Image (spheres, rainbow, N blue to C red):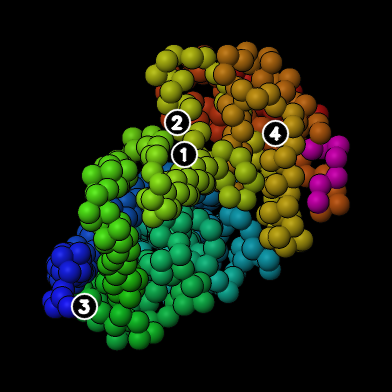
Amino acid sequence: MIRTKGLSTRFMVSGIVVLSVLITVVISLITSYRSEKDSLIKMSFQMNSMYTGKIAATVNELFIAEKASMKAHAEYIARHWTQPEMDELTAYIQHSNAMFNTIIIIDKNGIMQSLSPEMSPPLKGKKITTPGTLQALKERMPLVSEPYISAANALIVLVSNPVYDANGEYLGFIGGTIRLHESNLLNAVLGSQQNAVAGNGSYSYVVSATGALLYHPDKDRIGEHILSNPLFSDLAAGRSGEKRITNSRGVDMLASYSYIKELGWGIVSQTPTSIVLKDAKRPMVHIATYVISIMLVILLAIYWVIGRMSQPLAKLAQYASLLSTTKSLHADVPRIHSWNSEANALHRAFVMAVSRIRMQLDHLSLEAQTDALTGLNNRRTMDKYIGTWLAREIPFTIMLLDLDHFKQVNDNYGHEKGDEVLKFLAANMRALFEGNHICCRYGGEEFVVLLPETSEDEAVRRANKLRRFMAETNSPVGRPVTLSIGLARYPDSAQDAEALFRSADEALYRAKHLGRNRIESASSAVVVS
């Protein structure tokens, strides 16, 4: 029997197909990796730049507003310098300003005239010789200090304004302190990116004009000087930009930075380069996986079933090309009927992948709408409801709740117990209010309940039910923790969200001022325990 020489047509065609695909894959992978790497690095710089620019502008405007506010307070206090209500004025300024942890008034001799809240041990009447105080007394002009250790042994930044009487005589200054290790409006603004980038190694920090860290996700580093950081020289010169650097921990970073003109500070947002490069490699793996699958299908179906095999793959490929659109994530994966196991496995993989993506999006959507500690709606969700109701002119009542003496709970029992008290209140809010009532955590120990289509009398009744329950029930600290509540109603009390909140806040302040554990409304209707 004569054996034929050479290769079979099947082998040659299969070999040509395989070789062509392999060459294409290698070239595509190399090109894709380079393009993806450059694109991701550029995107990382752009996203970080957008963030730092936005936060820098926000902080800049925030301090401009706070300086103007502090100047107005200084002019008012100058007319009441020796009057007994100075302590009440100081307390009012502190309660109405979320920016500052403490408001202080110091005379020209450095003696503490008033402060809110009072410290332990008391500082009123004591001579204060901290660097920020000495700087304010020396310069006698509006200023934002460098970070220093306060008389209460806390790392702070002091925003101060001099106080002059009607004859131009220097009396002293009023100042607001920002405790860098504690919660306040500044830290809330600066820390707004952390949840968005959690898990990928990105983080942001703020550096002062002298190179001291004012904000950092690692609180132990706040106050540390980073003069050797390669970005500091640009920020010190008032420049913004982006660079690939090696940080003080030896990590290769893609950093974007913005200069805060009003303060001379700089904000830096950076992402590990390794994370970006790792993301650039993922398309290579996907491309290789898909191409190998397609190669197997083609080789098995090269003679006869190529058309039949390509049909289900074409459906999945068309669906895959639409995965970047929102509509595709809600559309079902197209059904296929194929006897080919690879096509069916690929279909199952698509179904599983899309299911996971939907679950992750639902989870992210829930996290974006709720407060992580209490499970109540967060402020963003609250604003959406208010905006919708205002646009539709739906009457509603807003209930602003604040736990009385909550700072003492944290001080006496610790912040973990304080968190349990917050969750205890949240659970009772859910239990005592109807399903159409929107329960939210506004911030700290402040909560909000929105009651659509609810009269003020009905809102007062429900508020009093919650207030009485809290006053008569032991909390997680073993004793009741009472509530003060302020009410306002749209459209009776105000015509817009800002004015409505202001009315509810003023009612809450009256409830606090009149003894706590009570309810005040914008219309002066009062319910007392």
Residue behind mark 3: 1
Q: In this picture, which residue range is highlighted in magenta?
A: 470-476
Residue behind mark 2: 384
Mark 4 element type: helix
The residue lying toward the viewer, choosing from 489 and 1, is 1
Residue mark closest to the camera, 2 vs 3: 3
Instruction: Compute the Cα span from label 1 to label 2.
Output: 6 Å
Mark 1 element type: helix
Q: Residue 341 appears at what percent x and percent y? A: 42, 53
Instruction: Compute the Cα span from label 3 to label 1.
Output: 84 Å
What residue lies at 42% left-to-right and 15% top-to-bottom?
392
Marks 1 & 2, CB-CB < 8 Å contact: yes
Q: Residue 155 appears at what percent x and percent y? A: 50, 72
Residue behind mark 1: 380
Q: Would you call the spot at circle 1 few (<14 residues within 10 Å), some (14-19), or many (20 or more)?
A: some
Marks 1 & 4, CB-CB < 8 Å contact: no
Work out whether mark 4 precedes mark 2 in sequence or the reverse, and give the earlier one: 2
Residue behind mark 4: 430
Instruction: Identify the amino acid type marked 3.
Output: Met
